[in-house]
Image: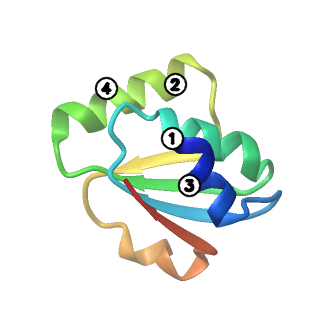
Amino acid sequence: MVAIMCDLLDIHDGMNILEIGTGSGYHAAVMAVLAGSGHIYTVERIESLALFARDNLKKAGFKNVNGYRRRWFSWASRICALMIG
């Protein structure tokens, strides 16, 4: 399913993507690899999941993913694609 969603978004190098629903961070990690020099902004409403994803992405060494729980509208104008999971 992750592959299908990424294919439908036609993710390529340099894209900035907003993901709604971070979960474990897996999908954000896959999109981060595909986006290359781009950036993934991911929002999770459940604090325990947001922290879990943050830790997972940090341990995996991702630098082009930022997770948020609030105040994300300031950078929303830079988004190329939206993924709701």
- The residue nearer to you, when weighing 81 against 73, is 81
Q: Distance between the residues labelled 1 and 2?
A: 14 Å
Quickly name the residue at label 4. Answer: 52
**Residues at circles 4 and 1 in contact by the CB criterion of under 8 Å:** no
Q: Kindly identify the amino acid type of the residue bearing the numbered disc 2.
A: Lys
Which badge, 1 or 3, comes first in the chain's sequence?
A: 3
- The residue nearer to you, when weighing 72 against 31, is 31
x, y percent for residue 1: 51, 43
Q: Kindly identify the amino acid type of the residue bearing the numbered disc 1.
A: His
x, y percent for residue 61: 63, 23
Q: Distance between the residues labelled 2 and 3?
A: 23 Å
Q: Kindly identify the amino acid type of the residue bearing the numbered disc 4.
A: Phe
* 5 vs 33: above or below: below
Q: Residue 58 carries which label?
A: 2
Left/right placement of residue 34 relative to residue 31 reads right
* 14 vs 76: above or below: above
Residue at 68% across / 56% down in the picture?
7
Q: How far apart are marks 4 and 1 (CA)?
A: 13 Å
Q: Residues within 10 Å of mark 1 (few under 14, many from 20)?
A: many
Left/right placement of residue 73 relative to residue 63 reads left
